[in-house]
Amino acid sequence: MKTFYKVFLAVFIFSIAVSLYALDWQAGFMDDENTKFIFSISAGILGIIVVYILHLWSKLAEKK
């Protein structure tokens, strides 16, 4: 995996960890206070998926 992808992977994992830490576990999952963290977590997961897809595409381009 290229350094470029590793940097973004670390950024997305860090943002997910911070959002999980900031969640108010006593309130409901979809409470108004928690929705911004839920959206942040989902964006981080989507970012990890995109980084993985870009990594696979770069590996396919090298084989040709």
Image (cartoon, rainbow, N blue to C red):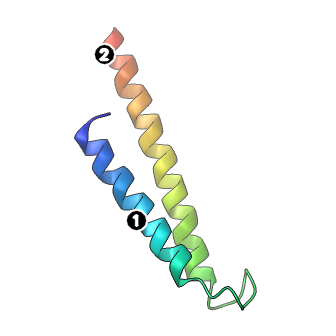
- Note whether 33 is above or below 55 in the view shown: below
Task: Indicate left or right for 19 with 60 as reference.
Answer: right
Q: Residue at x 32, y 43 (%)?
A: 5
> x, y percentage for residue 11?
35, 60
The quadrant in which residue 61 appears is top left
Taking depth in this image into account, of 23 and 61 the one nearest to the observer is: 23
Q: Residue furthest right?
A: 28
Q: Residue at x 71, y 91 (%)?
A: 26
Quadrant assignment for the C terminus: top left
Q: Residue furthest left?
A: 3
Taking depth in this image into account, of 7 and 60 the one nearest to the observer is: 7
* Mark drawn on residue 61: none
* Mark drawn on residue 14: 1
- Note whether 35 is above or below 3 in the view shown: below
First in sequence: mark 2 vs mark 1: 1
Task: Indicate left or right for 28 with 5 as reference.
Answer: right
Secondary structure of the residue carrying numbered label 1: helix
Task: Indicate left or right for 4 with 24 as reference.
Answer: left
Secondary structure of the residue carrying numbered label 2: helix
Spatial CA distance of label 2 from label 1 is 30 Å
Residue placed under numbered mark 2 in the picture: 62
Taking depth in this image into account, of 26 and 64 the one nearest to the observer is: 26
Q: Residue at x 55, y 67 (%)?
A: 41
Residue type of the residue flagged with mark 1: Phe
The quadrant in which residue 55 appears is top left
